[in-house]
Amino acid sequence: MRPLPDKFVRALKAPVFLLCLGPAFVLTWKGFHGGLGANPIDVITRTTGRWTLTFLLITLSVTPVRKLSSLTWLIRFRRMLGMFAFFYGSLHLMTYVWLDKFFDVHAMLHDIAKRRFITAGMTAWALMLPLALTSTTGWIRRLGGKRWQKLHRLIYFSAAAGVVHFIWLVKADLRRPLTYGAILAVLLAYRLIAWLVALFRTRRAAVREPVQA
Amino acid sequence: MLIKKSSDISSSEITPKSAYLSRRKFISGAVAAGAALAGGVYLREHVGSSNTVHASGAKLSGIVKSPLSTSETPTSFKDITNYNNYYEFSTDKYEPNGLAKNFRTRPWTVAIDGMVKRPKKLDIDSIMKLAPLEERIYRHRCVEGWSMVIPWVGFPLSALIKAAEPLAGAKFVAFQTVLAPDQMPNQKESGVLDWPYVEGLRMDEAMHPLAIMAVGLYDEVLPNVDGAPLRLVVPWKYGFKGIKAIVKLSFTDSMPPTTWNRMAPDEYGFYSNVNPQKDHPRWSQANERRIGEFRKRPTLMFNGYADQVGSLYSGMDLQKNY
């Protein structure tokens, strides 16, 4: 398949961007129209949390989908998708800091230290922070592609911490968090296999080389 | 599989400088969306929810007011019935109301067994005539950290226990929810909870005047979503102690198993009294969000019923007996 023309990709960015903002729009609209039910803060917390994980998984699926198909242009949306994971993650964190704890630093520190699901959630967000900050082209240049890529593998750990956060906060019925966990496992397994295959090929090439020389 | 070992990032992986939206725009957009979101909630909390008039549900007659009611403003009927844990139907708090709509509450009998004079079956309609129906406006505190004020209609649990005629040696009463997987979708699933749901009280707790059997809400027949036709209400305990759709009471001399305790013994004890000093391992119990309020309020010992029920637990270590 021919790669999508640059013009087309650029034209697609605006609708994709708006689509990604959709959940925030819906939440806001419902917020103004009493559509968030009896406990709006709970709905906001859960919705932003779910979309954070969803965008992390979408971001992580860009590479496998791109490599297993011919949709190479997908990579041009990866940064935007990753930034949306950070956007929803930050809204999620803000809901906690503001609407749950009302900026009570002492209570939050106590929470982070004592409640393992909060610890996991904070870890997941903290791991996204350097990725969001170094997401610019300038930072890719400054760090060098290889180092930048290495740093951005933190997303694996962020997503894993996010899934653990979800598993630990559920009282019973782990079906939902485990669904996210299963998808993440597949996405990470793809990378492990890809890495092993690459390793195997390099070794074989290294063994063959002297013979060929 | 196409696995390239690239030494550096290829140019195609970098969005061109002329990318549609600049970072600055993205961030300002995010901030605006966040602020709008917060504003929406604020409005909803401060301007919003009026007590909705509810059409369905038959009126109950002859209800007497009780001096045990709180004078706090009751939560709206809409919020009470649409924000509720009823795991037999769904683990989502917004879903049970719809899913329980067609739940059959007649015919309904309650079995009495264990340490009683003689085991028997009581019909729900005769149970509802055991004692005059009272309006009991109680605070309701969920273990998850939210609370409501609920105008229950019911009668003292002690009246049902008297009718059950337990033996002198009975020290506990165990309750059981109906097992109806054809009507309760989650009862068909494994991995939610062990069905049927079971709960229990010590005899002195069960005989306490604050403990009631609820058969109504807002002067009407109890909505299915709230545990119709018969549910337990023990306002000084966390909400999950209030077992719904009861079909059996068993009297025993040993502490009966309770569903959440079986599920996670370190998180849910047999007593499960509301206690702001005893944290749930995963969240604090010091505060609660009253449905309809923006800021959290401090949780009171025994949910504010300490004067009435404190003596039941005198001498007990409530950190251990949670």
Image: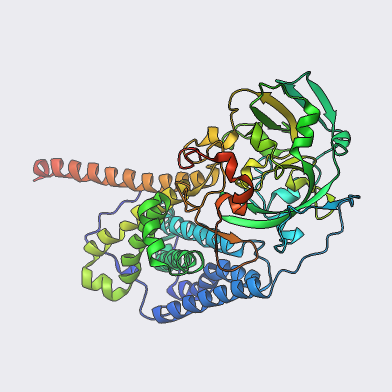
Q: Where is residue B54 in the image (x, y as percent from the top left)?
A: 83, 60
Q: Position of residue A163 (x, y in %)?
A: 44, 50
Q: Position of residue A120 (x, y in %)?
A: 38, 53
Res A124 visible:
no
The residue shown at (53%, 44%) is A171
Q: Is B289 on the left-hand or right-hand side of B126? A: left
**Viewer-side residue, A19 vs B120:** B120
> Residue at the right extreme?
B61
Q: Is residue B185 above or below residue B275?
A: above
Q: Is B93 on the left-hand or right-hand side of A108? A: right
Q: Is residue B320 above or below residue B250?
A: below
Q: How many labels does the image show?
A: 0
Res A187 visible:
yes
**Viewer-side residue, A81 vs A199:** A81
Residue B48 picture quarter: bottom right
Instruction: Give the colouring mode of the picture.
Output: rainbow
Q: Where is residue B2 in the image (x, y as percent from the top left)?
A: 34, 51
The residue shown at (47%, 56%) is A53
**Viewer-side residue, B312 vs A181:** B312
The residue shown at (77%, 66%) is B51
Q: Is residue B186 above or below residue B62?
A: above
Residue B106 picture quarter: top right
